[in-house]
């Protein structure tokens, strides 16, 4: 199609050939330029002066509509269509019918190919298909460098355009660097063994080398502190020693395949089998086997341990990542991680949190939209990625990163200051934790203790249920790292979006309100009893605070307490020391429980509000649904009134009340909670400093008087009013 000559001449000949072949009076090629603009690059039939002069925004006119919807369209009477936009410089007023198709590359629109006729023509399905086929060739012409460089759109479809991509925060923080594309898959070239006798020894030697590499990794400096990230690698090593996996590979080799092909075959079989499983945690374990297969093939091909030449500030871009793959990269150069897939429970995310690497997951299309060495900003605080940002954006984020670091230093300098309002009311700040790594910051944050320790993560990082001894060691380590500060242990809270690999529950239409949390452990009391036994043993005569999650009615609390009493009696009978002081409480996240407060308050020492679930249940609104994410607000009058009544009931019965959801870690939300009577808040470590500073700048009496007049209002949210109050009264909300 292109022939010889200049790029413009080749394009001109191309559109001429298309017009002739489809018996059209006009054929035009529009190419997507920076700023989401479609520019006329070549035409046969329109005025030549319109080339590079006519531009349409994506979504503007019929050409823009085809680009926006990325699908072919045909109009017998185009000029009377409501989306038609007339461009007088084109001379197109004499053409009435129009057919256009998107020019696609890698699934993305990079231009539009259009034909027009003077007559009112009804284009056939065959003509549309023909034009689509031609557009496939045109895509290679456009993206392959045949368009002059100064006029070229982004290489391979918008690669030069600045982009902002949203995702899900897997670890907070800000990182700026250059993109490095993770390519884990190694192509197996030789499938059938020429000398089958030599393949099995090759496989055994490579497997031994793989095991040695993993042993070295476990003995590295990164693993010295222990914690969940070490547990992850130990679990990964167990997968590498799985007899069934090794046996299947050996059988494939004995069937005549090369060792590399046998590893690939077994992995493909495993992927096909596991990809049918709906359980997200089990599907994530597929990543571990994929990582193992690629790593073993590397050992077989002699490419294991080859150093990667990384930029000094590397942002790693990957579809997904196994835990050992992440640790292959130089941690001094690796600044951030962006994944097309991923979840907070994936093993690589646990490792990244331990190494303090900002991570964003579920960033759609990053592998096709980001080029190697592109500048990338990972904004883990706001769940977004900036690709090829302008200098002003880079400068702003460098300033934000410096300011963030400075604020963190200033918060650390204030850690020993009392968290007391201007008018003398003390507020107690605790941290939420789920990793041993979180406890490293307990002292530096100045938090009074751990208001919520999520015990489920060690269960999720293993391929089998941890026994009592293993759990006792984990909880003992938590006591040790807390250094005498109080810790509230929440019992196993799984189900919903937190699924254990060794429990195959049936799929549920609404898992957030399904078989989860205390409902599981009451149905499987042996699991809860083992956990309670381990907690009692780990306490070693120290204070022990246990909190049961997802309690919906008092009878569930009674059943859980009965199991605890049995375990206390069991440990006393064997001569083990009793906890010095035992405190038993519940999460309040199911609204029904609030209507049994009188009976509940007789049975508990404390209540902790789980605002994340409570708010979604109050509004019958799935907090994971993006269509509903901004529809309801935690600072709605209905939420605050509900919580204020709870505060009053607990205060009257002298039962400690706290809040441990995300709401407590936002300074503006925390201000409202303190205003309605909360005095104990538990939050992520980074939120301690900002909330402490807010408390120290707050006149509580004035806020209480202001709130009293707000709670009866019919507003959807009080957020704007409270922000205005903070600004007018000098309350530091960041």
Image (cartoon, rainbow, N blue to C red):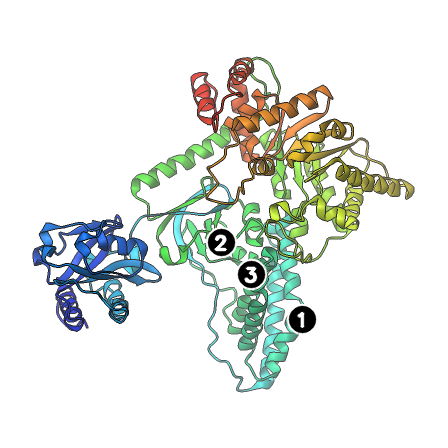
Q: Counting residues from the N terminus, which is met first, the one under dot 1 or under dot 2?
A: 1
Placement of 25 over or under 397, stated as above or below: below
Q: As rendered, which of 55 and 269 lies closer to the eye?
A: 55
Q: As rendered, which of 115 and 541 lies closer to the eye?
A: 115
Q: Residues within 10 Å of mark 2 (few under 14, many from 20)?
A: some
Residue bearing mark 2: 330
Q: Is residue 148 left or right of residue 563?
A: left
Q: Counting residues from the N terminus, which is met first, the one under dot 2 or under dot 3?
A: 3
Is residue 413 visible to the viewer in this orientation of the structure? no
Q: Residues within 10 Å of mark 3 (few under 14, many from 20)?
A: many
Q: Position of residue 610 (x, y in %)?
A: 62, 35
Q: Position of residue 482 (x, y in %)?
A: 68, 35
Identify the residue shown where x is 24% and y is 56%. 153
| Front tag of 2 and 3 | 3
Measured Cα–Cα span from mark 2 to mark 3:
21 Å
Measured Cα–Cα span from mark 1 to mark 3:
17 Å
Q: Is residue 466 left or right of residue 342?
A: right
Q: Counting residues from the N terminus, which is met first, the one under dot 1 or under dot 3?
A: 1
Q: As rendered, which of 620 and 101 lies closer to the eye?
A: 620
Task: Describe the element under mark 2 as helix, strand or loop.
Answer: loop
Kindly indicate the quadrant of the structure image that contains residue 209.
bottom right
Is residue 354 visible to the viewer in this orientation of the structure? yes
Q: Residues within 10 Å of mark 1 (few under 14, many from 20)?
A: few
Identify the residue shown where x is 18% and y is 57%. 77
Task: Describe the element under mark 1 as helix, strand or loop.
Answer: helix
Kindly indicate the quadrant of the structure image that contains residue 295.
bottom right
Residue bearing mark 1: 244
Q: Which mark is residue 287?
A: 3
Q: Position of residue 318 (x, y in %)?
A: 46, 57
Q: Position of residue 549 (x, y in %)?
A: 69, 40
């Amino acid at each position: 199609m292109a022939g010889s000559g200049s790029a413009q001449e080749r394009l001109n000949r191309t559109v001429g050939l298309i017009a002739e072949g489809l018996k059209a009076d006009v054929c035009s090629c529009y190419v997507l330029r920076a700023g989401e603009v479609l520019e006329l690059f070549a035409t046969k039939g329109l005025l030549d002066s319109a080339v590079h002069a006519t531009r349409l925004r994506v979504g503007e006119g019929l050409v823009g509509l085809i680009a926006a919807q990325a699908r072919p369209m045909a109009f017998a009477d185009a000029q009377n269509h409501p989306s038609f936009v007339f461009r007088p410089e084109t001379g197109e007023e004499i053409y009435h019918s129009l057919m256009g198709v998107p020019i696609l590359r890698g699934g993305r629109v990079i231009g539009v190919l259009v034909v027009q006729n003077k007559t009112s023509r009804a284009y056939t399905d065959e003509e549309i298909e023909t034009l689509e086929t031609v557009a496939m060739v045109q895509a290679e012409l456009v993206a392959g460098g045949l368009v002059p460089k100064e006029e070229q759109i982004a290489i391979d479809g918008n690669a030069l355009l600045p982009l902002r991509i949203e995702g899900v925060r897997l670890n907070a923080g800000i990182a700026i660097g250059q993109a490095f594309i993770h390519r884990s898959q190694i192509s197996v070239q030789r499938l059938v063994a020429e000398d089958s006798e030599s393949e099995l020894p090759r496989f055994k030697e490579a497997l031994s080398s793989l095991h040695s590499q993993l042993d070295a990794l476990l003995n590295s400096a990164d693993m010295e502190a222990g914690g969940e990230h070490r547990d992850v690698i130990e679990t990964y090593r167990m997968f590498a020693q799985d007899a069934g996996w090794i046996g299947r590979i050996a059988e494939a080799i004995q069937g005549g395949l090369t060792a590399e092909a046998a590893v690939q075959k077994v992995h493909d079989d495993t992927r096909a089998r596991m990809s049918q499983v709906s359980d997200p945690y089990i599907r994530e374990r597929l990543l571990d086997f994929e990582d193992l297969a690629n790593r073993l093939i590397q050992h077989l091909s002699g490419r294991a341990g080859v150093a990667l030449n990384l930029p000094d500030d590397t942002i790693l871009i990957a579809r997904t990542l196994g835990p050992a793959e992440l640790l292959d990269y130089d941690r001094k150069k690796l600044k951030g991680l962006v994944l097309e897939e991923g979840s907070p429970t994936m093993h690589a995310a646990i490792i990244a949190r331990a190494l303090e690497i900002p991570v964003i997951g579920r960033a759609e299309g990053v592998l096709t939209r980001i080029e190697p060495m592109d500048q990338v900003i990972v904004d883990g605080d706001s769940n977004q990625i900036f690709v090829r940002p302008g200098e002003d954006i880079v400068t702003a984020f460098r300033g934000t990163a410096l300011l963030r670091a400075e604020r963190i230093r200033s918060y650390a300098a204030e850690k020993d200051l009392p968290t007391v309002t201007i008018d003398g009311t003390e507020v107690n700040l605790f941290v939420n934790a789920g990793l041993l790594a979180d406890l490293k910051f307990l002292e530096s944050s100045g938090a009074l203790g751990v208001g919520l320790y999520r015990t489920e993560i060690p269960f999720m990082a293993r391929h089998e249920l941890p026994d009592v001894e293993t759990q006792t060691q984990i909880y003992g380590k938590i006591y040790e790292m807390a250094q005498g500060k109080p810790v509230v242990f929440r019992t196993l809270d799984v189900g919903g979006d937190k699924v254990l690999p060794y429990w195959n529950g049936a799929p549920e239409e609404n898992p957030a309100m399904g078989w989860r949390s205390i409902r599981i452990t009451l149905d499987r009391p042996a699991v809860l009893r083992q956990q309670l036994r381990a907690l009692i043993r780990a306490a070693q005569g120290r204070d022990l605070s246990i909190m049961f999650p997802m309690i919906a009615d008092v009878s569930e609390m009674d059943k859980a307490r009965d199991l605890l009493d049995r375990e206390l009696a069991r440990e006393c009978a064997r001569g083990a020391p009793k906890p010095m002081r035992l405190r038993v409480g519940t999460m309040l996240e199911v609204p029904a429980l609030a209507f049994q407060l009188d009976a509940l308050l007789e049975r508990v020492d404390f209540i902790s509000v789980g605002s994340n679930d409570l708010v979604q249940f109050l509004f019958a609104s799935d907090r994971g649904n993006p269509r509903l994410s901004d529809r309801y607000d935690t600072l709605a009058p209905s939420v605050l009134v509900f919580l204020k009544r709870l505060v009053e009931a607990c205060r009257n019965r002298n039962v400690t009340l706290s809040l441990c959801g995300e709401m407590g870690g936002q300074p503006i939300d925390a201000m409202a909670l303190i205003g309605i009577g909360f005095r104990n808040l538990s939050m992520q470590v980074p939120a301690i400093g900002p909330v402490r500073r807010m408390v120290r700048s707050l006149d509580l009496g004035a806020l209480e008087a202001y709130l009293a007049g707000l709670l009866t209002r019919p507003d959807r949210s009080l957020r704007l009013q409270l922000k205005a109050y903070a600004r007018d009264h000098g309350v530091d909300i960041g």
